[in-house]
Image (cartoon, rainbow, N blue to C red):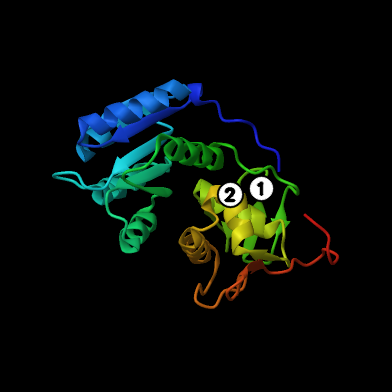
Amino acid sequence: MEQQRIDPRSMTVLVVDDEPRLVDVVRMNLEVEGYRVLAAANGYEALERLKADLPDLVMLDVMMPDMDGFETLRHIREVSNVPVIMLTVRAEESDRIRGLEIGADDYLTKPYSPRELQTRIKALLRRAYNPAPPRKTKIVVDSDLTIDFSKREIWVRGQRVTLRPTEYRLLYHLVTNAGRLMTHDTLLSKVWGHEYRDESHYLRLYITYLRQKLERDPAHPRYILTERGVGYRFRELDGLADGEAL
Protein backbone atom coordinates (compact mmCIF):
# COMPACT_ATOMS: atom_id res chain seq x y z
CA MET A 1 0.00 0.00 0.00
CA GLU A 2 1.64 3.23 -1.13
CA GLN A 3 1.59 6.22 1.18
CA GLN A 4 2.45 9.83 0.61
CA ARG A 5 5.17 11.16 2.88
CA ILE A 6 3.93 13.35 5.71
CA ASP A 7 5.72 16.73 5.54
CA PRO A 8 6.56 17.91 9.09
CA ARG A 9 6.62 21.52 7.86
CA SER A 10 2.87 21.35 7.37
CA MET A 11 2.19 19.87 10.83
CA THR A 12 1.58 21.57 14.18
CA VAL A 13 2.28 19.71 17.44
CA LEU A 14 0.84 20.88 20.77
CA VAL A 15 2.98 19.82 23.76
CA VAL A 16 1.10 19.83 27.06
CA ASP A 17 3.34 19.52 30.12
CA ASP A 18 3.91 21.49 33.33
CA GLU A 19 7.69 20.98 33.11
CA PRO A 20 9.10 23.89 31.05
CA ARG A 21 12.47 22.20 30.61
CA LEU A 22 10.90 19.11 29.06
CA VAL A 23 8.76 21.27 26.78
CA ASP A 24 11.87 23.14 25.62
CA VAL A 25 13.70 19.88 24.83
CA VAL A 26 10.76 18.49 22.88
CA ARG A 27 10.33 21.79 21.03
CA MET A 28 13.98 21.83 20.02
CA ASN A 29 13.92 18.25 18.74
CA LEU A 30 10.71 18.68 16.77
CA GLU A 31 11.50 22.09 15.31
CA VAL A 32 14.74 20.67 13.91
CA GLU A 33 12.55 18.21 11.98
CA GLY A 34 10.40 21.09 10.69
CA TYR A 35 7.33 20.83 12.92
CA ARG A 36 5.59 23.91 14.27
CA VAL A 37 5.45 23.43 18.05
CA LEU A 38 2.98 24.99 20.48
CA ALA A 39 3.06 24.62 24.26
CA ALA A 40 0.53 24.50 27.08
CA ALA A 41 1.39 24.22 30.78
CA ASN A 42 -1.86 22.61 31.94
CA GLY A 43 -5.07 20.98 30.74
CA TYR A 44 -7.13 24.17 30.70
CA GLU A 45 -4.56 25.97 28.56
CA ALA A 46 -4.36 22.91 26.30
CA LEU A 47 -8.09 23.03 25.60
CA GLU A 48 -7.87 26.71 24.71
CA ARG A 49 -4.91 26.11 22.36
CA LEU A 50 -6.77 23.20 20.79
CA LYS A 51 -9.72 25.42 19.88
CA ALA A 52 -7.64 28.39 18.79
CA ASP A 53 -4.80 26.72 16.88
CA LEU A 54 -6.23 23.35 15.70
CA PRO A 55 -2.99 21.34 16.12
CA ASP A 56 -2.43 18.21 14.03
CA LEU A 57 -1.17 16.21 17.02
CA VAL A 58 -1.18 16.59 20.82
CA MET A 59 1.49 15.32 23.22
CA LEU A 60 -0.23 15.17 26.61
CA ASP A 61 1.45 14.61 29.98
CA VAL A 62 -0.53 12.49 32.44
CA MET A 63 0.72 13.93 35.75
CA MET A 64 -0.38 17.58 35.82
CA PRO A 65 -1.88 19.68 38.63
CA ASP A 66 -5.55 20.69 38.77
CA MET A 67 -6.66 18.67 35.73
CA ASP A 68 -4.56 15.61 34.90
CA GLY A 69 -3.91 14.23 31.44
CA PHE A 70 -6.72 11.67 31.60
CA GLU A 71 -9.34 14.32 32.39
CA THR A 72 -7.88 16.64 29.76
CA LEU A 73 -8.10 13.85 27.20
CA ARG A 74 -11.77 13.26 28.03
CA HIS A 75 -12.49 16.92 27.26
CA ILE A 76 -10.42 16.77 24.07
CA ARG A 77 -12.39 13.76 22.83
CA GLU A 78 -15.66 15.62 23.36
CA VAL A 79 -14.69 18.09 20.64
CA SER A 80 -11.88 16.59 18.53
CA ASN A 81 -10.41 13.41 17.04
CA VAL A 82 -6.91 14.95 16.94
CA PRO A 83 -4.21 12.28 17.42
CA VAL A 84 -2.98 12.22 21.03
CA ILE A 85 0.21 10.71 22.49
CA MET A 86 0.12 10.34 26.28
CA LEU A 87 3.35 10.97 28.21
CA THR A 88 4.00 9.50 31.65
CA VAL A 89 6.76 8.52 34.07
CA ARG A 90 4.69 5.50 35.08
CA ALA A 91 4.96 2.34 33.03
CA GLU A 92 2.10 0.32 34.53
CA GLU A 93 0.03 -1.37 31.84
CA SER A 94 -3.16 -0.34 33.68
CA ASP A 95 -2.29 3.33 33.09
CA ARG A 96 -1.58 2.68 29.42
CA ILE A 97 -4.85 0.80 29.01
CA ARG A 98 -6.75 3.57 30.77
CA GLY A 99 -5.37 6.21 28.44
CA LEU A 100 -6.09 4.17 25.34
CA GLU A 101 -9.63 3.41 26.50
CA ILE A 102 -10.33 7.12 27.01
CA GLY A 103 -9.14 7.83 23.48
CA ALA A 104 -5.35 8.17 23.37
CA ASP A 105 -3.71 6.94 20.18
CA ASP A 106 -0.29 6.14 21.61
CA TYR A 107 1.69 6.14 24.83
CA LEU A 108 5.30 7.06 25.67
CA THR A 109 6.99 6.45 29.01
CA LYS A 110 9.51 9.02 30.25
CA PRO A 111 12.40 9.14 29.72
CA TYR A 112 12.27 8.53 25.97
CA SER A 113 14.81 9.22 23.28
CA PRO A 114 14.31 11.97 20.68
CA ARG A 115 14.49 9.30 17.98
CA GLU A 116 11.71 7.25 19.58
CA LEU A 117 9.53 10.35 19.93
CA GLN A 118 10.03 11.35 16.30
CA THR A 119 9.32 7.79 15.14
CA ARG A 120 6.08 7.62 17.11
CA ILE A 121 4.93 11.03 15.91
CA LYS A 122 5.62 10.20 12.25
CA ALA A 123 3.82 6.85 12.54
CA LEU A 124 0.78 8.42 14.20
CA LEU A 125 0.54 11.27 11.69
CA ARG A 126 0.87 8.74 8.87
CA ARG A 127 -2.08 6.76 10.25
CA ALA A 128 -4.21 9.81 10.87
CA TYR A 129 -3.62 11.87 7.73
CA ASN A 130 -2.62 9.35 5.08
CA PRO A 131 -5.68 7.07 4.89
CA ALA A 132 -5.67 3.77 3.07
CA PRO A 133 -6.85 4.05 -0.55
CA PRO A 134 -10.03 2.23 -1.53
CA ARG A 135 -9.87 -0.87 -3.71
CA LYS A 136 -13.60 -1.19 -4.17
CA THR A 137 -15.96 1.75 -3.89
CA LYS A 138 -18.85 0.27 -1.94
CA ILE A 139 -19.15 -2.99 -0.03
CA VAL A 140 -22.51 -4.26 1.19
CA VAL A 141 -21.55 -6.82 3.82
CA ASP A 142 -25.18 -7.64 4.67
CA SER A 143 -28.43 -5.82 5.44
CA ASP A 144 -26.88 -4.40 8.63
CA LEU A 145 -23.49 -3.19 7.42
CA THR A 146 -22.42 -1.16 4.38
CA ILE A 147 -18.92 0.25 3.90
CA ASP A 148 -17.92 2.88 1.35
CA PHE A 149 -14.15 3.30 1.52
CA SER A 150 -14.01 5.97 -1.18
CA LYS A 151 -16.30 8.23 0.89
CA ARG A 152 -14.98 6.98 4.24
CA GLU A 153 -18.55 6.19 5.26
CA ILE A 154 -19.74 3.29 7.43
CA TRP A 155 -23.47 2.57 7.73
CA VAL A 156 -24.74 0.27 10.48
CA ARG A 157 -28.44 -0.62 10.45
CA GLY A 158 -29.22 2.53 8.50
CA GLN A 159 -27.21 4.87 10.72
CA ARG A 160 -23.92 6.45 9.73
CA VAL A 161 -21.14 5.52 12.17
CA THR A 162 -18.06 7.68 12.69
CA LEU A 163 -14.72 5.90 12.99
CA ARG A 164 -11.50 7.40 14.29
CA PRO A 165 -8.58 7.22 11.81
CA THR A 166 -6.97 4.17 13.44
CA GLU A 167 -10.32 2.34 13.61
CA TYR A 168 -10.86 3.09 9.92
CA ARG A 169 -7.43 1.76 8.92
CA LEU A 170 -7.92 -1.40 10.96
CA LEU A 171 -11.32 -2.04 9.39
CA TYR A 172 -9.87 -1.36 5.94
CA HIS A 173 -7.20 -4.04 6.31
CA LEU A 174 -9.64 -6.55 7.77
CA VAL A 175 -12.32 -6.03 5.13
CA THR A 176 -9.96 -5.93 2.15
CA ASN A 177 -8.66 -9.30 3.33
CA ALA A 178 -12.11 -10.71 4.14
CA GLY A 179 -12.05 -14.44 4.79
CA ARG A 180 -8.30 -14.45 5.41
CA LEU A 181 -6.61 -14.79 8.77
CA MET A 182 -4.71 -11.62 9.69
CA THR A 183 -2.13 -12.31 12.39
CA HIS A 184 -1.53 -9.95 15.29
CA ASP A 185 1.90 -8.98 13.91
CA THR A 186 0.52 -8.31 10.44
CA LEU A 187 -2.28 -6.04 11.66
CA LEU A 188 -0.04 -4.16 14.07
CA SER A 189 2.54 -3.57 11.34
CA LYS A 190 0.02 -2.50 8.70
CA VAL A 191 -2.14 -0.30 10.91
CA TRP A 192 0.31 1.11 13.47
CA GLY A 193 3.73 0.44 11.92
CA HIS A 194 6.54 -2.10 12.30
CA GLU A 195 7.72 -0.52 15.55
CA TYR A 196 4.40 -1.49 17.19
CA ARG A 197 4.58 -5.24 16.60
CA ASP A 198 4.87 -5.96 20.35
CA GLU A 199 1.98 -3.67 21.36
CA SER A 200 -0.74 -6.32 21.21
CA HIS A 201 -2.98 -4.47 23.68
CA TYR A 202 -3.46 -1.71 21.08
CA LEU A 203 -4.93 -4.23 18.68
CA ARG A 204 -7.20 -5.82 21.30
CA LEU A 205 -8.62 -2.45 22.28
CA TYR A 206 -9.31 -1.30 18.74
CA ILE A 207 -10.92 -4.60 17.81
CA THR A 208 -13.20 -4.03 20.82
CA TYR A 209 -13.97 -0.49 19.64
CA LEU A 210 -14.89 -1.73 16.15
CA ARG A 211 -17.10 -4.49 17.49
CA GLN A 212 -18.93 -2.03 19.73
CA LYS A 213 -19.67 0.18 16.74
CA LEU A 214 -20.46 -2.51 14.14
CA GLU A 215 -21.83 -5.60 15.85
CA ARG A 216 -25.36 -6.18 17.13
CA ASP A 217 -23.85 -8.22 19.96
CA PRO A 218 -20.15 -7.35 20.45
CA ALA A 219 -19.72 -10.32 22.81
CA HIS A 220 -20.75 -12.68 20.00
CA PRO A 221 -19.37 -11.00 16.84
CA ARG A 222 -20.52 -11.87 13.34
CA TYR A 223 -18.10 -9.70 11.37
CA ILE A 224 -14.72 -9.58 13.14
CA LEU A 225 -13.87 -13.10 14.26
CA THR A 226 -11.10 -14.07 16.68
CA GLU A 227 -8.57 -16.76 15.85
CA ARG A 228 -7.44 -17.27 19.44
CA GLY A 229 -3.74 -16.70 19.99
CA VAL A 230 -3.13 -15.97 16.30
CA GLY A 231 -5.12 -13.01 14.99
CA TYR A 232 -8.44 -11.92 13.51
CA ARG A 233 -10.50 -12.63 10.43
CA PHE A 234 -13.28 -10.60 8.82
CA ARG A 235 -16.13 -12.84 7.70
CA GLU A 236 -16.18 -13.91 4.06
CA LEU A 237 -18.15 -11.61 1.79
CA ASP A 238 -20.89 -12.92 -0.45
CA GLY A 239 -20.33 -12.56 -4.17
CA LEU A 240 -16.54 -12.89 -4.09
CA ALA A 241 -14.77 -15.93 -5.43
CA ASP A 242 -12.36 -17.75 -3.14
CA GLY A 243 -9.09 -15.87 -2.96
CA GLU A 244 -10.41 -12.79 -4.79
CA ALA A 245 -9.23 -9.51 -3.28
CA LEU A 246 -11.47 -6.50 -2.95
Residue 90 position within the rendered picture, expressed as x and y whole percent measured from the top left: 27, 54
Label 2 element class: helix
Q: In this view, does 221 lie above or below 195?
A: below
Residue at the image position 32 percent from the left and 43 percent from the top: 111
x then y, percent, for residue 214: 55, 64
The answer to which of 40 and 210 lies nearer the viewer is 40
- Residue tagged 1: 149
How far across and how far down the image is residue 176, in percent?
71, 56
Name the mark nearer the viewer: 1 or 2. 2
Are the residues tagged 1 and 2 within 8 Å (C-beta)?
Answer: no
Quick check: 118 left or right of 111?
A: right
Pointer 2 local density, CA inside 10 Å: few below 14, some 14–19, many at least 20: some
Q: What is the three-letter code of the residue carrying label 1?
A: Phe
Give the residue at x 75% y 49%: 136
Is residue 23 among what the camera can see? yes
| Residue 110 vertical placement versus 242 (above, below) | above
Residue 246: percent from left, percent from top: 77, 54
Say if 229 sits above or below 141 in the image: below
Q: In which quarter of the image is the N terminus?
A: top right
Where is mark 2, residue-wise? 194
